[in-house]
Image (tube, rainbow, N blue to C red):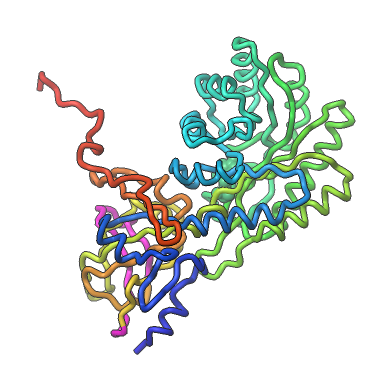
Amino acid sequence: MPSLTDQQSLATPAGQPHFHYRNGELYAEDVPLVWLAEQLSTPLYVYSKAALHSAWGSYTQAIKGHDVLVCYGMKANSNLAILQQFAKLGSGFDIVSGGELMRVMKAGGNPGKVVFSGVGKEVWEMELALNSGVKCFNVESVPELKRLSAVATRLGRTAPVSIRVNPDVDAQTHPYISTGLKENKFGIAIESALETYKLAKQLPGLNVVGVDCHIGSQITEVSPYLDALDKLLNLITTLTTEGIELHHLDLGGGLGIRYDDETPLAPGVLLDAVFEKLAQKGLKLQLVLEPGRSLVGNAGLLITEVQYLKHTDDKDFAIVDAGMNDLMRPALYEAWHGVLPIRPRMTQTHVYDVVGPVCESADWLARARALALEEGDLLAIESAGAYGFVMAGHYNSRPRAAEVLVDGKHWDVIRTRETFDDLIRGEALLDRV
Ligand SMILES: *Cc1c(COP(=O)(O)O)cnc(C)c1O
């Protein structure tokens, strides 16, 4: 029979110290999670402010003394209160839509520190970004470059542009989150980059300011970044001989975090290697980074309640009240998330598949976990701060979960639980049936 200490030492695969056991139950900072679940119900996203600040600190520590702008890749978690934290810390933002830009401004972020990525920028999004004065458009195709030139000219503005180059490197990550290979839809092939820069130089309404790449996500090795950097540096040399001078180099985001037993890529380790290469080249460019997951991933938990324990001949299922509509990563990427009992039991464990109530076989959160459970127990799904709530939907007419930000012994609801009215907002019954 497992003792409480065994469970505790096994219990935090993601290694986030701001979520920890105290007197046999799991806390977020100084707030007992049982308490939050009782008051706010489940499923519930809980974020730790201290964890966000500590993740940010690992970047500020690593960039000390260098000209670096960190632009939070906000699609990982775009709750206004989370953005507000990063805005207050001085972060820039990497956005991929006009909606994200509106969130940045609502949260008090500085549009002058915004880089605008994405393969499908629409005219209204370009207009909004130009009128807000974003730092840079990361342009991903020639037709986009031409559209941006036309829109900027019509508005009488100049669009600062980087070309997002596809360096054709293997980020050694899941195919769905790899973006820097030739076959991906992202960026412009490095072989075509020079002619694209020449075109950008000629087109009216554009000001070439940088070069950009983003090779994938959940990357745990330095080498793919250095391979990409080498290719970008060669390109920069060629551009210089062609009389095209750049102001910044954007290496994108993608630093991996610990979900299970991965060794995360510390910003300091990556950046030391990057600064060394830049120094060798004698380059005085500003460096831009776009980290998303590594700033928020391990700062969040998804709290869920066990509804039923279902024992079949083949398997034991723990059916919980959070599903793939709340946390899509397992269904989408077969992602592994740690599962922590909020009040660990001393009783015999069983090997459970932790599954949701949604009518899909893909609706699972964790497979084959040894847990001692009873109906009504609370579980915390770890590492749910990135690509969690932002990917949530209403499938099966399930209102989206509430979100809470904990700060020491204080906590605030930063998004209320949705109601039935939220589910049907905008829908209409017809008079003529
Ligand atoms: C998603 C994305 C990011 C953030 O990626 P993470 O893996 O979360 O760090 C950064 N830049 C671009 C262009 C992206 O699409």
Q: With respect to residue 150, does 32 lie above or below?
A: below
In this rendering, the count of numbered labels is: 0
Position of the N terminus, as image quadrant, is bottom left
Tell which of 349 and 8 is nearer to you.
Answer: 8
Q: With respect to residue 415, does 341 lie above or below?
A: below
Look at the image and say whether residue 22 sits in the magenta stretch.
no
Residue at 60 percent of width and 53 percent of height: 56
Question: Based on the displayed image, in which of its 4 quarters is residue 257 positioned?
Answer: bottom right
Question: Based on the displayed image, in which of its 4 quarters is residue 234 positioned?
Answer: top right
Span highlighted in magenta in the image: 346-367
Look at the image and say whether residue 350 sits in the magenta stretch.
yes
Question: Based on the displayed image, in which of its 4 quarters is residue 290 positioned?
Answer: top right
Tell which of 100 and 47 is nearer to you.
Answer: 47
Q: Is residue 400 visible?
A: yes
Q: In the displayed structure, does residue 4 sit left or right of residue 138?
A: left
| Residue situated furthest front in the rendering | 409
Residue 379: image x %, image y %? 33, 67
